[in-house]
Amino acid sequence: MMTHIFSFEWLHFRKSGVFWGTATALPLLIGFSLFLGSERINEQNETISDIIATETVFYDNMRSQLEAIERGEAEVDAWFQNPANPLVLGQFGQAGRHIFLHPNPLAPLAAGQLDILPYYGKVTLTTMEPLRDNALENPFMQVSGSFDFAFVLVWLVPLFIIVMGYNVISSERERGTYSLLQSQPVSMRTILVQKMIFRFLLVFGIIILSLFVWAVLFGINLFNIQGLQLIAAISIYAAFWFALCVLFNLFQTSSAINAVGLTGLWVFFLLIIPSVISLIVISLHPVPSRALWITEQRAIQQAIQAEGDAIFDTWVVDHPEEFVEGDTPQFYDTWIRRFVWAQATEEREREAERQFEEPRERQAQLASRLRVLSPPMTLQAWLERKAGTDKDRLRSLEKEMRSFQQEWQEFFLPRFQRLEFFTADELTDLPAPQ
Amino acid sequence: MNIYSIARNQLTQLVRDKVVASLGLLILLLLGISIITGISYYSEITEQHQEAEELARLQWEKQGDKNPHSAAHYGTFAFKPVTVLSVFEPGVDRYTGVSIFLEGHRQNFAAYSLAEDKDSSRRFAELTSAFIFAYLFPLFIILAGYRSITAEKESGMYRFLKSQGVSTGQLIAGKSLGLWAVILLIYIPFLVIGLIFLFITGAIGDSLAGFLFMGIVWLLYFGVVAHITITVSALANSSGSSMVVLLSLWILSTLLVPRLITNVASGIHPVPNTSEFYQAVRTDLLEGIDGHNPYSEHSVAFRDSVLAAHRVDDVADLPFNFRGMMLQEGEEFEKKIYDHHFAKIDEIHRAQNRLFSISSFLSPTIAARMSSMAVAGTDMHAFNHFSAEAEAYRIELVRELNMDLKINAVGDRAVGYTAGADFFAQNIAFTYERPESVFVSSTQLMPLFITLLWFVASILILTVAAHKKEEI
């Protein structure tokens, strides 16, 4: 029976504008979204390799300068130009390392929060600066959001499904072929379900086929476990919307009412629930104002400045072995204090930063619980996680920067504190992020 | 006469239609919530900003005795104010930084956007009046109107009406009026509540023009949707196909084109990334005067010219503090370089905006949204205006500091010169004045013009449809 219905459906679909429309539009939309996605990743990779190259050139220069000095072929005029000085190597100008969140293999699928949060930043001995490429972006883009595969799948695919499935039974009734079908030795439900399965397979096939073909063309590897997970996610999501269509076709309503009802559900899941969730989340766990935070930060800096001498004296008492007393160059006296103060500032700022982290985390937790109410939101969040472009991952940049800064400090600070300069040989194994 | 009977009949039908009535109530409810949350957001942010502004000024004045140039490095902040109209149309506000750090030698980007701290679910949808008007209201109009003509045909009423001497034109005009009445039934309460809110907050004087413009923009947009809806309904074979066509147009206008064009625009007119930007600035700075590096080529020439002008051989013999003068010279040079690079970015943004404007010929939503952001003072131009004012303030403040150093750090006081609380308290303070006119840039008029064009075009196609379907 199934093959029978399938073959009739196919004959019917071959002549239908809806089918050809879907079969043309979906692959094109998917293709274009993946094209933009792979462009985005190429750009990211280019930025990353450019920055790494600049960094390498800088340190190679430092080393060759130092070699020249060691051979007696060159001299330095000032301490801040001396490539053996730990400050010159770890803190000033172009010195320091960039930390990157490298794009995941599935990153082309979802732009996620990349337009808001940075994916790389620069670390020196005292600074951690996330580089906000979006600071230069046209903010209208962030308002509109990205056109990516996640958008096509989460937002548009359900609409194609609705168009394909809203009138499966109701149109039979409206055309007067309903009683013909009823006279067949098959139950109406069987026909409905099998017709829907046919349509599901059709849409699912178009999505998977075009996804994989384009992915191969754009160099995105989906022939792995993640590809399988993606297929599973797509099939569940498509099945969810087809199930809603089945539900509507079970009622004895007209095609028009079905269309209105299904579109209403789409609006409900994609627009109303998310806006209500974000409202609830923000009202229950408000994040304090960044404007006030800025002045708070400043107050911390002022406090450190005021207590500066006391803080430094305490540090000297606690770390006698890390401080050279006596006739030291002026930059040493200046910078050894700065490092102590920077550390104190950082500790207090981190304490103050908690007032943002905590509500943010609570917001995220509550949102992830409420998200279950809307399958589109759940899928979007899942895709962003797979792509590594969700807020959690992008926020982890800060943690990575902090942990690398520690490594960087452990390498340079003891040498600076003991006023031991570097030799050219030592510059070959400066710490670098993995 | 016929037209008004049809319109009245249409209105009664729609109000009695449970689906339409409950959707209308839902929209009113959502609008109510959006205004309440918008107001609480606005008052909270305004309060915090005022507090932060006062604190920042206090911190500046009480920074202690220090060399004016150290004070320039210490810097201060400009906080982006929120407009009253952001209650209805937050525009790009949540995506631009809340404050700019103002210091000597460099121009910084605005930092800390609200979007960074908020949960990402709001990227799906956000309960604001603008969001409801741009996305949900058109859907409501489509739902209310997609069957207006097709249903008459499907029920056989159409032929009956014809036999009564009703022309297609009259039918279409009546149906359009009926649909307009429903739209106004929901929209007018919103306008009244908005006006009351503006009146209560005392912002009516400054924001009335913007609010009225915004009101008109959305009304034009609703008109476009309503006219297209009736046209499609008049031309469609069945209610089902009318619905599918209208929904496709809705998707195209609200979802597809806006997302596509922003991605295409950033592909065609890409902005450099931050490190490229800084690299370019740095390269240019190295070529020029650097206040901290008096040995560079330019500064040596500058020093020599100053020495020659005063006929002395050593900067110590000058009647003023040369370092103060040098720093100011360097500052102005740096400003030129930053301005040059920021102007390039601005040019890219303008090119992108031109593409958005062009794309709004495909999507009235883009035209309406850009217009409403413009009149609400929450678009990119408004933000740029604030940044420019902050930058003008920065350069003036730094000039005051350098001049103090130049004039006062002389003679015995030259070494270890510091300025005190008196001086810092006198320094110019930043108060951002919003431009008085609704529009800050002539390019903002473009989307408004396109919205109007859409409105006129939608009436035209409605008229064409009315004349075309005379038969049957």
Image (cartoon, rainbow, N blue to C red):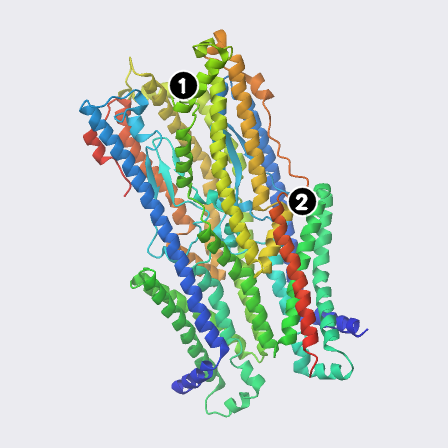
User: x%, y% of residue A58?
Assistant: 29, 34
Sort mark 2 into few (<14), some (14-19) or many (20+) by Cα contacts within 10 Å: many
Q: Quadrant of residue A202?
A: bottom left
Q: Residues within 10 Å of mark 1 (few under 14, many from 20)?
A: few
Residue picked out by circle 2: B438
Nearer to the camera, A381 or B327: B327
Circle 2 SS class: loop
In the foreground, A292 or B248: B248
Q: Can the viewer see residue B37 in this picture?
A: no
Please state which of the two labelled residues, at mark 1 or mark 2, is closer to the viewer.
Answer: 2
Label 1 sits on residue: A310
Where B323 falls versus A407 (above or below)? above
Real-space CA distance between mark 1 and mark 2, rounded to the nearest whole angstrom: 54 Å
Would residue B269 appear left or right of B202 to someone viewing this image? Answer: left
> What kind of residue is marked 2?
Val
The picture places residue A119, in percent across and down from the top left corner, at 39, 45
Left or right of B436 on screen, residue B166: right
